Image: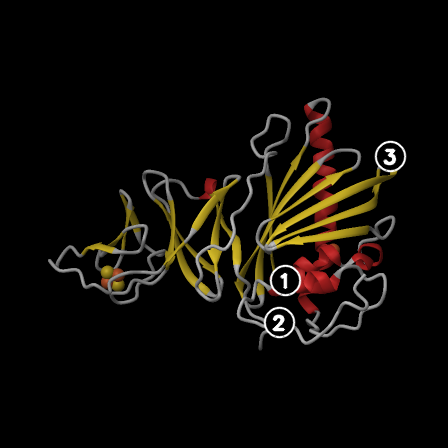
Amino acid sequence: MGTRFPYGLPSGWFQVARLVDIEPGAVKPLRYFGRDLVLFREMSGAVRLLDAHCPHLGAHLGHGGRVDGDEIVCPFHAWRFDGSGRCTKIPYSEKVPRQAAIAPWVTVERCGLVFAWHDRVGRPPMWTLPEIPEYGSDEWTPFEPRTWSVRTCNQEMAENAVDLAHFLYLHGTASMPTTSTSVDGPHMHVHSKTHMTTPAGVVEGSIEVDSYGFGYVTTRFRGIVETLLLSSVTAIDEDHVDVNFHFSVKKIGGGSITRGVGKAFVAEVTRQLEQDIPIWENKVFLPSPVLCRGDGPIGPFRRWARQFYPEMTNDPVDLDAAAE
Ligand code: FES
Ligand SMILES: [Fe+2]
């Protein structure tokens, strides 16, 4: 089956692991960005990500490779590689061939998570990821993870935040949100006013979404309680993504009240996501959709999104007319 999305995989930072899942000395095979990768953690604590296959005879370092000090040792003939992918030693040969190297990936850690830089044209990282002040704060609950695998792509999922009409008709929210959008390079800010249905009735709330590309998005909900969602959607290949959500709630009253509110909030976001999944998994991407007034800022969103496919030039389609 061919791919359903015509632009391929976007550039940006994307979550590839949680630090708690990769202890010092651990080795993990990964499959992201349509590539086989190996993640390992040096005994000194640094996390490293390399292409998976050994340049010698092609073994996958993530299946049987082991960490020794700050190096990873291939399971097949024990060639050793450092975190930059350079072969440092071949135990049965005095000479290491100059081409004996594996492509390294740039990673950064935020909020106990590891993000990898993926670039379709091989550029070094084009932007940095902001710290999240709620993470580690005494006033906020520890980040709580949820994950899904979905048959869709980054852009289709991200468009959900600016697709205003679906909130009412798919998710059954109390009203259609109203939004304002601003863009600064890879950062897009969407401010929405909305009505949220709660056990105490309908309350007015606001939602601030800050996207730094498709793979690092904070959503701050304010209404009865403040809640934070950090989300990163990582492409496995052109048609499948891993969705990583981390939730945190601003502490209120006793621990049990916060826990109760947190649970209700996670349940509501999960309910909405699980309503979106069958739409995403079965829809097609229309480069020239028929839009109408009231649809929300889909045109500005798609223009912002275009930068993550850097070699692509102007979009021949003008979505301005019906965008807002
Ligand atoms: S295949 Fe890795 S050392 Fe031979
Ligand atoms: Fe949705």
Q: Is residue 144 left or right of residue 92?
A: right
Q: Are marks 2 and 3 in contact (CB under 8 Å)?
A: no
Q: Which mark is residue 5?
A: 2
Examine the rendered structure and indicate whether residue 311 appears above or below residue 105.
Answer: below
Examine the rendered structure and indicate whether residue 4 appears above or below residue 297.
Answer: below
The total number of labels drawn is: 3
Which residue, given by chain and number where applicable, does mark 1 sit on? Answer: 305
Is residue 152 visible in the rendered structure shown here? no
**Can you tell me which quadrant of the image ligand 1 is in?**
bottom left
How many other residues sit within 10 Å of disc 1, few (<14), some (14-19) or many (≥20)? Answer: many
Regarding mark 2 in the picture, which secondary structure is present there? Answer: loop
Which residue, given by chain and number where applicable, does mark 3 sit on? Answer: 200
Q: Are marks 1 and 2 in contact (CB under 8 Å)?
A: no
Regarding mark 1 in the picture, which secondary structure is present there? Answer: helix
Q: Earlier in the sequence, mark 2 or mark 3?
A: 2
Amino acid type at image mark 3: Ala
Q: Is residue 69 left or right of residue 243?
A: left
Residue 285: which quarter of the image? Answer: bottom right
Q: Are marks 1 and 3 in contact (CB under 8 Å)?
A: no
Residue at image point 85% right, 61% down:
294
Q: Which mark is residue 22?
A: none
User: Percent from the top left, x then y, of residue 123?
Assistant: 44, 61
User: Percent from the top left, x then y, of residue 20?
Assistant: 47, 40
| Viewer-nearest residue: 221 or 178 | 178
Q: Earlier in the sequence, mark 1 or mark 3?
A: 3
Task: State how far apart marks 1 and 2 are (Cα).
Answer: 13 Å
Amino acid type at image mark 2: Phe
How many other residues sit within 10 Å of disc 3, few (<14), some (14-19) or many (≥20)? Answer: few
Residue at image point 68% right, 76% down:
316
Quadrant containing the C terminus is: bottom right
Residue at image point 59% right, 72% down:
313
